[in-house]
Amino acid sequence: MRDTLKDKEWFDNRVTSLASYTEDIKDDLTRGPYTTQRIGGLSDLLHQAQFDLWQARFSRGDPVSELVAPFRELMLDYVADFVPAWYTDSLWLLSIGVMLEVDDEAFGTLAGTVVEQCREDWLYNYLIHSRLPEVGFEESPLLWSKPYQVLRQIVEEAEDKPAAMQRYLKRSWYRSHSSTGWYDSHKSAPDIYTGYWSYESGAVAKILKLDDSSLEGLKYYPYDLVHYKA
């Protein structure tokens, strides 16, 4: 188990339920014919369900090596039905792609789509730059200062970066997402919780090559993803 808010039995049930749900959506998509709007809606549901399933498996403690292939598929499916307004979705997929060191084709496909279709953003570009150096980031604006200005300060200003990252995760990260749909989802009914993970923090730590030994086991920090292939 990587998550501490639910037990393994709970996550086993959640994984089973989400796996069944994704197959139901796929079946719906094959039935057709549907309007473009209907297909788009089903595709959006499928992407969310696939990511929830992937995250629930990670939270449950599944070996990271077993999550790489499903993640690559998820990344490419997301690009096929890309929605530029989904900032967090793109951010998390880029971040996980950095940590898992996904192949150049998959990462480049998502990165290129983000660069072409989304508003310029410092955090997007910082992540992309780690794999595609021709994409600059230093002069880019930060679209969402809350909570990501702290990450920018860690990259650009913090002298003790591991300590600064620890403070950010303990004091700011979760609380600063109080307006999101997943905030406090572990308390919700029906069950929608799949885990709370600061993927972008892990990606920044990996890019900076931080000594993150002090972050191992820290709530929200995806240590096992950061150290995949390490």
Image: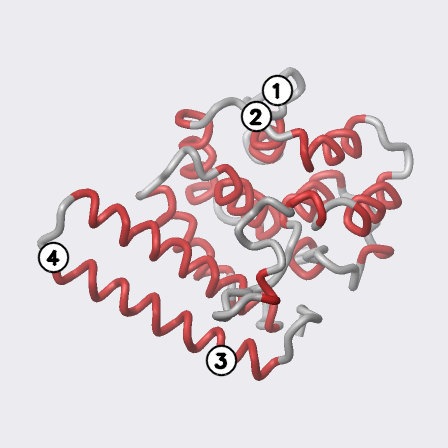
Q: Closer to the camera, 135 or 199? A: 199
Circle on res. 13: 3
In contact (CB < 8 Å): disc 3 and disc 1:
no
Residue 149, image x and y in percent?
72, 30
Q: Secondary structure at mark 3?
A: helix
Residue 67, image x and y in percent?
51, 64
Circle on res. 229: none
Q: Secondary structure at mark 1?
A: loop
Q: Closer to the camera, 124 or 112? A: 124
The quarter of the image holding the C terminus is bottom right
What's the CA distance linking mark 4 and mark 3? Answer: 30 Å
Q: Secondary structure at mark 2?
A: loop
Judging by the rendered image, the residue that carries numbered circle 1 is 141
The quarter of the displayed image where residue 59 is located: bottom right
Judging by the rendered image, the residue that carries numbered circle 2 is 121
In contact (CB < 8 Å): disc 2 and disc 4:
no
Q: Is 129 on the left-hand or right-hand side of 27?
A: right
In contact (CB < 8 Å): disc 2 and disc 1:
yes
What's the CA distance linking mark 3 and mark 1? Answer: 42 Å
Q: Residue at x 56, y 54 (%)?
A: 182
Q: Earlier in the sequence, mark 2 or mark 4?
A: 4
